[in-house]
Amino acid sequence: MSAGSVAVVVTEEIEVPSWDLYELSIPCTVFGKPQPDLADPWYDLRLCGTGEPSPDGRGGPAGSGLTVRTDYGLDGLVGADTVIVPSVPDSCVEEGTPLPAELVAALRRAHAAGARIVSLCTGAFALAEAGLLDGRRATAHWMHTAQLAERYPKVRVDDSVLYVDDGDVLTSAGLTAGLDLCLHLVRRDLGAHIANQLARRMVVSAHRPGGQAQFIDLSVPATDDEGLGPVLEWARANLDQPITVEELARRVAMSPRTFYRRLRASTGMTPLQWLLNQRLARARSLLESTDLPITRVGELSGLGTANNLRHHFLKQLGVSPGDYRRAFPRAMSG
């Protein structure tokens, strides 16, 4: 087992926005701090900026971010065992601003030279632009996966998982999922024991599998069909009761077939899918905000028994109701 070298891309070397510092700090913390009692040598970390290296450590004018000095340019990606893109500028995601051509080319060269390529959160856009995700399953933060899928149709985007390990190319969702993926890399490189010890020092979960679901919002999208609004509100207020498609259709004076067609056109979901998402959303809210027994949560959400609630949580979210509640502890009162 070998730690190897890790090159981290700093896509905005001058004035990195403060909200992007978290993703940048994750690989620096995991791979940059020596852990001689766990593995010696530890990883060799290098920060590689998209601009020219700044040997004097001086950045640009003050603004909404912090200046970051990098000792390497993008040529430092080639020859690294692992290359990580923590994020890309917001404008590249939201406005379609082109990514730096030199970054795209450097990622291609690094991959061709045998590097393992990794993205955290919006860094997936850089990997996709380089063509490294074509035909592959990949993920990003669920708030950006629709844009990723639309812009790069050759990528099989999965918005439901924490991270995807496709061997030589790995992608993760945002924020804490990036930490999960970095610890997964340590586990691959140095074994489970060392990864677990490192996680313990960081006071985080030792292992959240990549297949665990992102906790995305399952509530219904806004509907433009005003005729359906009242019946959907009624359904949300009565989730603890049995609700059939026939009853919903009757309440808006439609045939079940017409109601099915109208709801699917408006929300992209079938009536049964919509009801299940609403019940799951209610159950999640109760688990987050109350200490009600799991059985009672199942009853109030309309998902029935504790076993049935567990079945749907494992299928849709990849965790049990109990584990979900522990992930969202309520603030102590008093």
Image: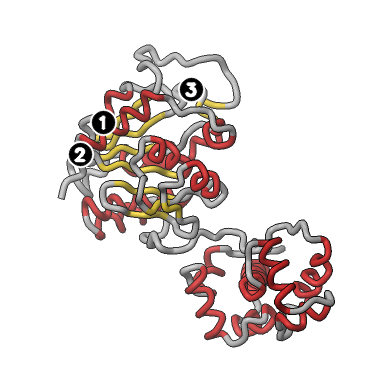
Q: For this rendering, which residue is in front, 268 or 288?
A: 268
User: Between disc 2 and disc 3, whose residue precedes?
Assistant: 3
Q: Amino acid at mark 3?
A: Thr
Q: Could you say which disc has been placed on residue 109 in the image?
A: 1
At a point 32% along the width and 24% down the height, the residue shown is: 74
Q: Could you say which disc has been placed on residue 67 in the image?
A: 3
The x and y percentages for residue 97 are 53, 28
Q: Distance between the Cα atoms at labels 2 and 1? A: 9 Å
* Residue 286 appears in the rendering: no
Q: For this rendering, which residue is in front, 133 or 184?
A: 133
At a point 67% along the width and 81% down the height, the residue shown is: 302
User: Between disc 1 and disc 3, whose residue precedes?
Assistant: 3
Mark 2 and mark 3 residues within 8 Å of each other at the beta carbon:
no
Q: Amino acid at mark 1?
A: Arg
The x and y percentages for residue 162 are 44, 56
Circle 2 residues within 10 Å: few <14, some 14–19, many ≥20: some
Q: Quadrant where the C terminus lies? A: bottom right
Q: Could you say which disc has been placed on residue 114 in the image?
A: 2
Check disc 3 and report its element: helix, strand or loop: loop
Q: Is residue 201 left or right of residue 150?
A: left
The x and y percentages for residue 83 are 30, 37
Q: Amino acid at mark 2?
A: Gly
For this orientation, the residue located farthest to the left is 1
Q: Is residue 244 left or right of residue 130?
A: right
Q: Nearer the viewer, mark 2 or mark 3?
A: 2
Check disc 1 and report its element: helix, strand or loop: helix
